[in-house]
Amino acid sequence: MPKLAAFPKAYMQALCKEGTMTVSEWIDLAADLDVDGLEWYAGFLEMEDESNWPKFREQVEATGKVIPMMCCSPDFTHPDASFREFEIEKQKRWIDMTHVLGGSYCRVLSGQRRPELSVNEGVALAAASIEACLPYAEERNVTLILENHYKDDFWEYPEFAQKMDVFCLLVDAIQHPNFGVNYDPSNTYLAGEDPLELLQRVSHRVLTMHASDRYLIDGTIEDLRREEDGSAGYAKRLRHGEIGQGLNDYDAIFDELRGKGFNGWISIEDGVDGIDQLKRSVTFLRKKIAEHWG
């Protein structure tokens, strides 16, 4: 049966920029959540100090949870080879971080959708960079997971592989036992596309999942698609919300995943309105997992 993890979506500014919340405070806050693990983020301010890594693992495991997944954002589509090499070295440090924390999965991305790049060029650059990291990950029993992402907070351009056709090209270009997909249904809406169509194309490669939900403030999905193809900013028509109350069809998603033998981690990347909302999302997902896998 899949296991549940939680991500501190509501507290990212406090943990990563403002320093008004400590990682230990997040661990304590999450201790009462009915989840099996905490998805980590490489950009927590306190992660700069490597001596904190084993300490945080001990703190999480003392609450009966583990750290299964690492969220980080390499940029592998820059035309400058020295820039890409620097990103590869950053990714290797994040792999080390994942390993020390006891995790099994570390995210990778393609990189920014720079206007000068053709699809073939971008896929080739991203695939070569990810493949350069895979032996390092394999040595540490870490699997790299490519997410159908939208855009890192600090990037100028959206994700190169945001569109499903490009994402599938990149996934197909990398055949390695320590590589797979982290599926996020909500990000597909930001590409103006259908999350179930994407899932059906990659479900045989899905190893982990981000559970979130989006809802339309006004208008329709067609309106969203017409507005710069759903890719400019976190579309104003869409908002994060409680899981089970938004656009995603979790019955259809879980049917597809179970049919492909999925038994991995599902990390909740919602709860933007606080811990009570996150608890309701946990309850919803526990119920759905029991229905489909129980």
Image (tube, grey):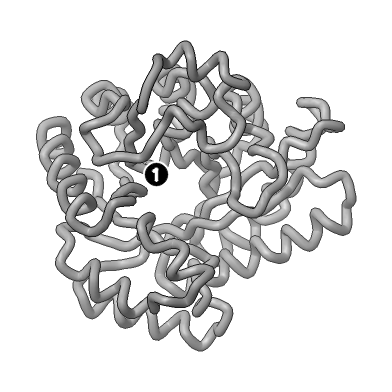
Q: Quadrant of the C terminus?
A: top left
- Horizontal relation, residue 234 to residue 38: left or right: right
| Quadrant of the drawing holding the N terminus | top left
Q: Residue at x 28, y 29 (%)?
A: 246
Determine whether the residue tagged by mark 1 lies in a helix, strand or loop.
strand
Drawn side of residue 262 relative to residue 18, left or right: left
Q: Residue furthest front?
A: 218
Q: Residue at left 23%, top 70%?
A: 29
Q: 41 or 177, which lies in front? A: 41
- At label 1, the amino acid type is Thr
Q: Position of residue 127 (x, y in %)?
A: 71, 40
Q: Position of residue 46 (x, y in %)?
A: 50, 79
Up-down relation of residue 75 to residue 175 (above or below):
below
Q: What x and y, as percent, mark residue 175? A: 61, 37
Which residue corresponds to mark 1? 208
Front one among 212 and 225: 225
Q: Is residue 265 visible?
A: no
